[in-house]
């Protein structure tokens, strides 16, 4: 049940990413476009994180501290430092 819910969530997230990605080029309002682009980027990061965690759980591997740091920081701009 746990994995089925997660897989469904991943599938729905992928659909949302696809829908926003298709619609985004046709949006003319700059504020709406900015908001949708921010949502899209956040969903992409979250989607990759969720897929990675599910993959690790399904394979039955132990998540090491290095794995967690990689998952947390891989897509973060500037990696915690101001401006780079």
Image (cartoon, grey):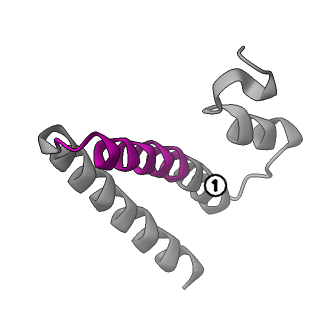
Residue drawn 29% across and 43% down? 33
* Quadrant of res 37: top left
Q: Nearer the viewer, residue 6 or 47?
A: 47
Q: Residue furthest bottom?
A: 1
Where residue 55 appears, as percent x and y from the top left, is 57, 53
Crowd rating for badge 1 (residues with CA inside 10 Å; few <14, some 14–19, many 20+):
some
Residue drawn 79% across and 28% down? 80
Residue drawn 47% across and 78% down? 4
Q: Residue furthest left?
A: 26
Residue drawn 50% across and 47% down? 42
Q: Magenta span: helix, strand or loop, mainly?
A: helix
What residue span does the magenta drawing correspond to? 28-48
Magenta stretch contains residue 34: yes
Find numbered disc 1 in the image and state the secondary structure of the residue it sits on: helix
Q: Residue furthest right?
A: 65
Magenta stretch contains residue 15: no
Q: Nearer the viewer, residue 19 or 69?
A: 19
Left of 34 or right of it: where is 73?
Answer: right
Query: Exactly how many numbered labels are in the figure?
Result: 1
Quadrant for the C terminus, please: top right
Residue on which the image places disc 1: 53
């Amino acid at each position: 049940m746990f994995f089925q819910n997660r897989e469904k969530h991943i599938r729905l997230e992928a659909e949302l990413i696809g829908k926003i990605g298709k619609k985004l080029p046709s949006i003319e309002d700059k504020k709406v476009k900015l908001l949708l682009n921010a949502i899209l980027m956040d969903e992409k990061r979250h989607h990759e994180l969720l897929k990675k965690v599910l993959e690790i759980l399904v394979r039955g591997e132990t998540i090491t501290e290095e794995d967690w740091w990689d998952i947390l920081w891989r897509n973060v701009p500037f990696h915690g430092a101001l401006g780079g």
